[in-house]
Amino acid sequence: MEIINGIGGRRRWSLDDKARIVEETLAPGAVVSEVARRHGLTPQQVFGWRRDARRSAEGGDDVGSPRFVPAVVEQASPKPVRKPRKPRRVGRGGEATGVIEMEIGGVTVRVGRGAEAKTVAAVIHALKASP
């Protein structure tokens, strides 16, 4: 039997008390119903306080409200100065030898005549995928 003395009605919990009780429920191995019972609460109350704390941590109840995140701006590192390249070799008839030269991620790839398109595509794809 439980005897209740004094004025009945709702108890008022401060935000600090609610936060402390919610924090107890987040400890590893804690059971919400046991924590609630220890403080004379129902588990539903504690779950409601946990939900409210989660919402306030996420930025409020407004689903469509704009949210701000910190932005980190870093100064771009200067690109290394490269020496000018040698002119391309010229074939016997004064024409270019048909070499395609590409630079991908600091790697120079030269594709000569007769290279298969599948092989060239595979090499380019592999270079783009590597860090």
Image (tube, grey):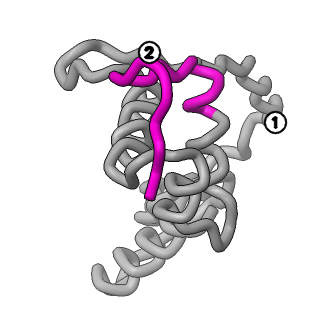
* Category of crowding for the residue at label 2, using alpha-carbon neighbours closer than 10 angstroms: few (below 14), some (14–19), many (at least 20): few
Identify the amino acid type marked 1: Lys
What residue appears at the point 63 percent right and 60 percent down from the top-left corner? 108
* Residue furthest left as drawn: 64
Find residue 110 and report its image quarter: bottom right
Along the viewing direction, whichever of 60 and 130 lies nearer the viewer: 60
Give the residue pinned by disc 2: 68
Q: Is residue 35 above or below residue 5?
A: below
Give the residue pinned by disc 1: 83
Secondary structure state at the residue bearing disc 2 = loop
First to last magenta residue range: 1-19
How far from the left and from the top, in percent, is residue 68?
44, 15
80 in magenta: no
Give the foreground label among 1 and 2: 2
The reply, left or right, for residue 120 in relation to residue 110 is left
How far from the left and from the top, in percent, is residue 103?
57, 52
Identify the amino acid type marked 2: Phe
* Category of crowding for the residue at label 1, using alpha-carbon neighbours closer than 10 angstroms: few (below 14), some (14–19), many (at least 20): few
What residue appears at the point 60 percent right and 32 percent down from the top-left corner? 19
Find residue 61 and report its image quarter: top left
